[in-house]
Structures are given as C-alpha cells and as structure tokens.
Image (tube, rainbow, N blue to C red):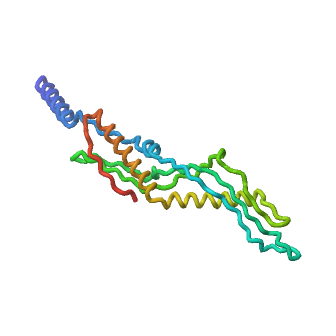
Amino acid sequence: MKANKIIALLLAGCMAAFCLSACTDEKAPDFSGYKEIAELATLECTFHNVAEIRNDGTDILFGINVGYKKAWFEYDSIVTLGVDVKKVKISGPNENGVVTIAVPDAQVLGLPDVDESSVSDIYQDTGLLTAIDRVDQMEAFKTAQEEMKKSAEGDVGLMSQAKERAQTLLGQYVQSVGQPLGQVYEVEFVDAQ
C-alpha cells in the first residue's frame, strides 16, 4: 500500500514538473492599444477656400435680365488626414522578433471643419430684381467643401506625410510595448488591403 502511495506521489510530481517545464517566463506582447495610436496619428491641415455663386442671367423678364447673380465669400477649414483604423493590423512578433504592421493609405477623415471666425462677408453683384438667398449660399458652401475635400485627397505629399506619421507612431508604440518585456522588436510595414 505504501509503495502505491509513493509511486502515485512520484507520478504526480513528475507530471507537475513536466507541465511546469512547458511554461516559460516570457510574456506575449499586448498590442491591443494600436487603434488608439492610429487615431492619434492624424494630421490636421488648414485650407483657405472660396465659395462662388454664379448664374449667367438666363432668366429674362420683359427683355430685362433678372436672373444674373454673382457672389463669393472666403473661409478657412481644417481638414483631418489619417489612416482608416479598421484596416490597421499588427501581427507578430515572429521567431526573429519582427513585428509586421499593415497600414492603409491615408485619406480625408470626415468633413472639413469650418473655422466660423474666418468666414468673410459675401461680395455680390446681381441683376435687377435678383437677390442672393440662403439657399444659394448653402449650395455654394456645399460645393466648395466637396472641392476642398477632393483637393486634399489629391495632394500626394500631404497623404504621404499622413501615412508616414501613422507608421512612425505605430512603430514607436510597438517598441514601447517591447521595452518592459526586455524585447527590441524590428518593425516591418506593409500596405493594408
């Protein structure tokens, strides 16, 4: 009976030693905060814009041009450039300590934010019995905002700068996660799909 207890204790000790030998002190890095870093990696640019209202005056009443409208106003907007956080992916580190970060191309995030203090007076010239109304102003503003967004999206230099900023901050984030673990990771960037 005593021999069976000793054998059972030895087997239990061997199993415990075997199970614990599979455990290592090395902790896996936690890169779960990368989305917040990618959101912080935005670039804000101020654009000056002009909104125009034009009607060549095709409305003629009794031979008098009553439809002629021409007006414009200026304003500044802040355009935010950055990467789509949902497309950023971090994988690794692999056996060589390389962490791969997939980063998409930069894009305009949201609509341009108008600096209301910069909106100028409306400068206008109209035909007889014609006025610039609120609808005209809103339509001109909407068109100007769309053109501003397209202009920012077409600026290759700004888009490149925004993507590089995201890559820099994400790379620094990966390094800062590795430091407490005593790891120095090599970071490799790839284009996200």
Find the residue positioned furthest to the left: 3
Q: Residue at x 81, y 66 (%)?
A: 127
Q: Position of residue 120 (x, y in %)?
A: 68, 50
In the displayed structure, would residue 3 be above or below residue 19? above
Q: Nearer the viewer, residue 17 or 74?
A: 74
Give the mark count: 0
Does residue 54 appear left or right of residue 114 in this picture?
Answer: right
* Quadrant of image for the N terminus: top left
Q: Quadrant of residue 125?
A: bottom right
Does residue 166 appear left or right of residue 22 in this picture?
Answer: right
Q: Nearer the viewer, residue 137 or 70?
A: 70
Viewer can see residue 120: yes
Q: Nearer the viewer, residue 185 or 10?
A: 185
Q: Residue at x 24, y 45 (%)?
A: 97
Q: Position of residue 191 (x, y in %)?
A: 36, 57
Find the residue positioned furthest to the bottom: 63
Q: Position of residue 94 (x, y in %)?
A: 25, 48
Q: Nearer the viewer, residue 174 or 81?
A: 81
Q: Position of residue 193 (x, y in %)?
A: 40, 59
